[in-house]
Image (cartoon, rainbow, N blue to C red):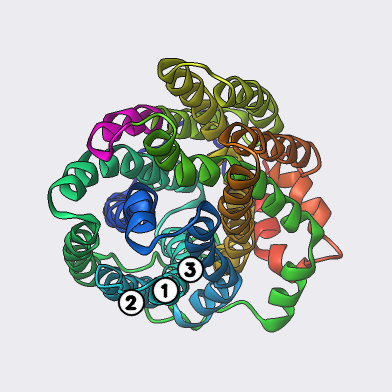
Amino acid sequence: MTVSRPRVGSRPRLSGPARLTVALLFAAWFIDYADRLIINLVLPSIGEEFDLSRSQQGVVLSVFFLAYALCQIPGGMLADRFGGRRMVLWALAAWTVFTVLTGFAWSFAALLVLRVLFGLAQGVFPPAAAKVLAERTGKEERMRANGLVLSSNSLAAVFTPLAVAPLVAAFGWRSAYISVAAIGVFVYTAIRMRLPQPLPQTPGGEEGDSAAAEGSAAAPRSDVRALLRWGTLWRFAAMMFGYSIIIWGLNSWVPTYLNDERGVPIEAAGPLLAVPALAATVGTIIGGQLSDRLAGQHWKVIVPGMSVAAAALLLMAYASGLAAFVVFGTVAIFATSLSYMPIFAVPMRSLPARQMGVATGVIIFGGQLAGVVAPSVMGVLADAFSFQVAFAFLVLGAVVAAVMACLTPQTTEALLADARGRVPDAVKESSTSMEKELP
């Protein structure tokens, strides 16, 4: 009996376990991203309290991403070894504790230490969450489910400034961390009690591991080494690096720019920051839909999107008025966000669930490395030259993403062909599944 290949652009209804998994991971990602965004909103207040230069403020941002980036690949290996659910719960509990402690930071040095610990705790979450999703969704619904989960990031970017700005204005920057930690406790409890069991293992390896085998079907060491040596996977990571240079550069410094250069107080900055964040939400969803319809071919989305983003970033950097700055910034972040889901599309469609932790860890590592580079470089450029030069630097991210989009396999077939001879064990299950689908 043959199984027909799904029609390109079809949108299968998510199964019950997939819907519940999406809802729980959406909540966890929302808190994860909100926790990360708070620092951008309160950085002017922290800089004033601890008398920090912009370069020092950039270090506060970058040390988190350094720790976060260093945990991506080990986090993926831990998720493949011990199970995605276990690592998601550990990460959520740990970063909730460090969120509370950040609200009690008493010095610049203490803040740096807490930011590092915070980054280490959150760093294991993304690959573990990707594995949890892969184990509880079929391949035909995985990209749609992942798009819904990751749209939480953009929605968090909408709601965080709207909620945090008035809270900080009324009670100070420390209150924001203590408040969001309480929500983290609720999300931890919900995941611990309600996360569905993994789907049964099928002969083709298309679904997740069984509940009894969760964490025991880790990738063999030979697979891990092969994945880490696979240049193509690192090109996907470089694509994420370019994308994230823009995202983290804007997220990190626009609030400070509005406060210092435009004289916009934090309570008034919230709505201004929510507008481009809403555009990013829409862009992420549209990018995911385009990925489904194109069945890969990510260059068709990323190259045009990054071209528009590069032009809009330059116009934003040298805009004379606040309205023009917000408009061009909104266009830039919308065009950039179109690329988010296409970056993941081919690897997530192609690789088996048991490889998802390490593979996504490599790709996300590229994005978090950009979080180390962009805030620090922009802080130095703002101190040495101007914010205009700092924002113009972000065009480099658009160039990197567009070039890497053209240098990576565009379909599952092309990716698996590239993997043969390099990571044969890692793609064996996926190749078997593809053969079963052929009439």
Mark 3 and mark 1 in contact (Cβ < 8 Å)?
Answer: yes
Camera-side residue of 349 and 245: 245
Mark 1 and mark 2 in contact (Cβ < 8 Å)?
Answer: yes
Q: Dividing the picture into quarters, in which one does residue 260 lie?
A: top left
Q: Residue at x 41, y 27 (%)?
A: 279
Residue 156: percent from the left, percent from the top? 32, 44
Residue annotated with mark 1: 121
User: Is residue 147 found inside the magenta-colored segment of the image?
Assistant: no
* Magenta stretch: helix, strand or loop mostly: helix
Return the disc, 2 or 3, that comes first in the chain's sequence.
Answer: 2
Q: Residue at x 65, y 64 (%)?
A: 429
Residue annotated with mark 3: 123
Q: Is residue 18 visible?
A: no
Residue 121 is left or right of residue 7, and the answer is left
Residue annotated with mark 2: 94
Element at label 2? helix
Residue 394: percent from the left, percent from the top? 64, 37
Camera-side residue of 268 and 136: 268
Q: Residue at x 56, y 51 (%)?
A: 375
Element at label 3? helix
Camera-side residue of 24 and 2: 24
In the rendered image of this protein, does residue 131 appear above or below residue 378? Answer: below
In the rendered image of this protein, does residue 62 appear above or below residue 301? Answer: below
